Image: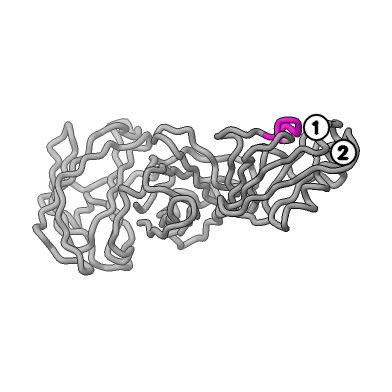
Amino acid sequence: MTTEESTVVGVELQLDLNVRGPQWEGVFDSLEVWRSRGLATGPYESMIANTWVPARLPIGSPDKPTSQPNGPSVNIVGKTLLLRVDEELDITVTFTGTNPLTYFQASLQINGQGLGRVVAYTVGNLLVIETTEAGNGALLRVVGGEAAPTLGLPTEEPLSFTFGREARIQLVTGKEVYPFVDKHGDENYFYKTRFYNALTNTAGTFGLPFNSKSAASLSASNLVIATIDLVDSRGVALANRAILLRPKFQGSPVDGKTVVDGDIQRLTDDDGHVEFVLVRGQAFTVAIAGTDIVRDFTAPADEAITSFNMLDPTLSTDDAFTVQKPDLRFAVRRSI
């Protein structure tokens, strides 16, 4: 599910990310969110860091060192550097003194003219500028100015514009829904998630990409996650198997909205897993391609149930066999 609120850049989107204990317990301790501002195939940029960090240019620059070097010397006296913070505040830095200035001297002048919204420092042969605000709500753009290229600062997108980043989402035993807010999102952006272990510095596989166009507009209490996990006769996860879901309701009112929909088809992922976000209390028919398995079920109305197996014999009818429940680990999934 997402909620939206207009911001300076796009809209503020809240993503409700759903995970289950068996997916991460004993292996991972946190969750990452990545975003593509283009296609579902990417490229994706991480919205997550080890801790909250500001918007920083050049992109990928190291943190401020304990001791800053002087860096290169450049002739920039009388030249300007044009910056924009949060796409609202324009900052003009005019360099004074006597040429040449070192990068470190230039950084001090940026700090003095940054209106308390940006700071600069040197690391190696780089001059780095960052916002004083941290998190993905922070935006920084190098607009231009004669001094920009001389200082090694890009002036053309995508390298001239960047976002801050959030700390990784810490996973908690027993918690299944984790809200994450993209402060400057867009309905056309795509997101994907993966688990992470901060102790071993290892990451899991990415889940399927999603965007807000596929988000449910009902409240989370009216929704439940329906899953199927498939293996073949060898016990190997059955990937790319089509699962067809057909709603049987006609115009049911839920939370002031009328529920109408057509058939939905999805493929199992590399772990043989597929899931759908469904409206509670509604009847469905599920079928598995390449088999004779067709089951009718009703999505649980009990809010204590956050996810369920669509082939569970206690929920589905015409079940001719006992559904097996292999102990498999799955990649993180979303709730929208």
Rendering coords of residue 91 (x, y %) = 67, 50
Q: Residues within 10 Å of mark 1 (few under 14, many from 20)?
A: some
Q: Are marks 2 and 1 in contact (CB under 8 Å)?
A: yes
Protein image colouring: one colour
Residue projecting furthest to the front: 78
* CA gap, disc 2 and disc 1: 8 Å
Rendering coords of residue 19 (x, y %) = 42, 53
Residue under label 1:
125
Residue under label 2:
69
Chain part drawn in magenta: 148-153
The image quadrant of residue 208 is top left
Q: Residue at x 28, y 62 (%)?
A: 218
Q: Nearer the viewer, residue 12 or 280?
A: 12
Amino acid type at mark 1:
Asn
Q: Is residue 319 left or right of residue 207?
A: left
Q: Is residue 29 visible?
A: no
Amino acid type at mark 2:
Pro
Q: Nearer the viewer, residue 221 or 188?
A: 188
Q: Residues within 10 Å of mark 2 (few under 14, many from 20)?
A: some
Q: Is residue 94 visible?
A: yes
